[in-house]
Image (cartoon, grey):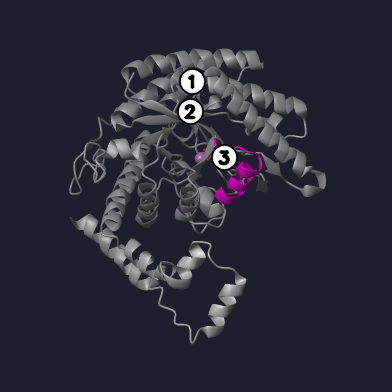
Amino acid sequence: MAYFKNVNKVNYEGPSTQNPFAFKYYNPEETMKNGQTMEEFLRFSVAYWHTFVGDGSDPFGQGTMVRPWNKFSGMDLAKARVEAGFELFEKLNVPFFCFHDVDIAPEGETLKETYDNLDEIVGMLKGYMKTSKTKLLWNTANMFTHPRWLHGAASSPNADVFAYAAAKVKKGLEVGKELGAENYVFWGGREGYETLLNTDMKLEQDNLARFFHMAKDYAQEIGFDAQFLIEPKPKEPTKHQYDFDVATGLAFLQSYDLTDHFKFNIEANHATLAGHSFEHELRVARINGMLGSVDANQGDTLLGWDTDEFPTDMYATTLAMYEILKNGGLGTGGLNFDAKLRRGSFEPDDLFHGHIAGMDSFAIGAKVAERLIEDKVFDSFVDERYSSYKEGIGLDIVEGKTDLHKLEKYALELGSIRNHSGRQEKLKGLLNQYLLEALTK
Ligand code: XUL
Ligand code: CO
């Protein structure tokens, strides 16, 4: 059955096309400067939860999304979503998708029943994946929706909940292996606290680390070599989440000897919720060798919550691609559209409009960023800005050849200190020039 009757395969038609169901900038076959095709480099992925499950409900109103598969329920609905899924993947020509366990199959009355439901749908997914090019970028366990997680999962004060969470992740790792997932994601939706008055923070964090170690051990035991990823988010749903941002997550991984097994999945809107820019989080991860994957979306600067919009801000996509190119790509990671349509964009066609806009925006970002890097627009400036560390006292500092005695002696002999302009406005103007040039070429 065709669920998206209005849309045929979405092809690249170039910037002047009038066809709304065509790519204007994303040309999967175009070779980038690094020799990879855009498809190989950008590694786009569809998020199962927003695209096939999300109904558009918000705290004030019920769902609005018109989805032809919603005439089914239970396992029939789960199966219809798989059919709709592969139709959309093929029409959008995306290489990857991602899901939480509960997105693909309904939870049963018991854990065993949940496993059975999962097994049936995983079998069906596997069948579809045999003939489709779309692969699994990552899977994860939803440990935040059901009431059992009300105090957390691996950081719950209730050991039974910890055990239940462990069972879900064990199953998730098996499913990931079965479907050839390239990564496995942990996002601690309820791993945090509401008030310190009832919280043993030390035990909760120790337990979270124990949980990650057990997951890593089990993955090794079954030969599942996916990259593990932590997805930082400061708050929402909890008031304070332990995976607050990349820097906090990194300190956690370092404290608990987990850095060899984890990288970060960075979500744009989570960065802004933490008071950072998207590129800041990518930079922190990159310079620490921890940039694994990206949840591509954007927030709204006028709103203080996670709006998960499809990414269309070309400054953000350009500066994100700048970091990703500097990282040498995302390795086994990708650009997963953890993005949902606005409540008013309720028609199935809108799913295509959202993804096309997002894919085109990142393609523009990639093209602009690779030119900025090739022309050393910022690099040459940054290089010059730090040139005092390439010789004399600066080189001694960098090479560890000084101490406070030597530096004091040097400072006492200094005449006047001369600083140089940071040229922020000039650099921003250059960024505009490169963006516009890429768009008009
Ligand atoms: C929630 C969020 C999650 C993770 C996976 O804000 O981003 O969907 O990506 O659990
Ligand atoms: Co996400």
Judge the density around disc 3: few (<14), some (14-19), many (≥20) Cα neighbours within 10 Å: some
Q: Are marks 1 and 2 in contact (CB under 8 Å)?
A: yes
Q: Is residue 319 above or below residue 86?
A: below
Q: Position of residue 326 (x, y in %)?
A: 37, 50
Q: Position of residue 30 (x, y in %)?
A: 21, 40
- What residue would you read off at disc 2? 226
Judge the density around disc 2: few (<14), some (14-19), many (≥20) Cα neighbours within 10 Å: many
- Quadrant containing the C terminus is bottom left
* Relative depth, front residue between 98 and 177: 177
Q: Position of residue 39 (x, y in %)?
A: 29, 36
Mark 2 belongs to which amino acid? Ala
Spatial separation of the CA atoms under disc 1 and disc 2: 8 Å
Give SS at disc 3: loop
- What residue would you read off at disc 3? 259
Examine the image and state in which quarter residue 60 appears.
Answer: top right
Magenta range: 245-260
Residue drawn at 76 percent across, 28 percent down: 159
Mark linked to residue 372: none
Q: Is residue 151 above or below residue 33?
A: above
Of the two numbered discs 3 and 1 in the rendering, the one whose residue sits closer to the viewer: 3
- What residue would you read off at disc 1? 177
Mark 3 belongs to which amino acid? Thr
Relative placement, left or right, of 336 versus 260 is left
Spatial separation of the CA atoms under disc 3 and disc 1: 22 Å
Q: Is residue 55 magenta?
A: no
* Relative depth, front residue between 186 and 222: 222
Give SS at disc 2: loop
Judge the density around disc 1: few (<14), some (14-19), many (≥20) Cα neighbours within 10 Å: many
Q: Position of residue 420 (x, y in %)?
A: 41, 78
The residue most toward the bottom is 415
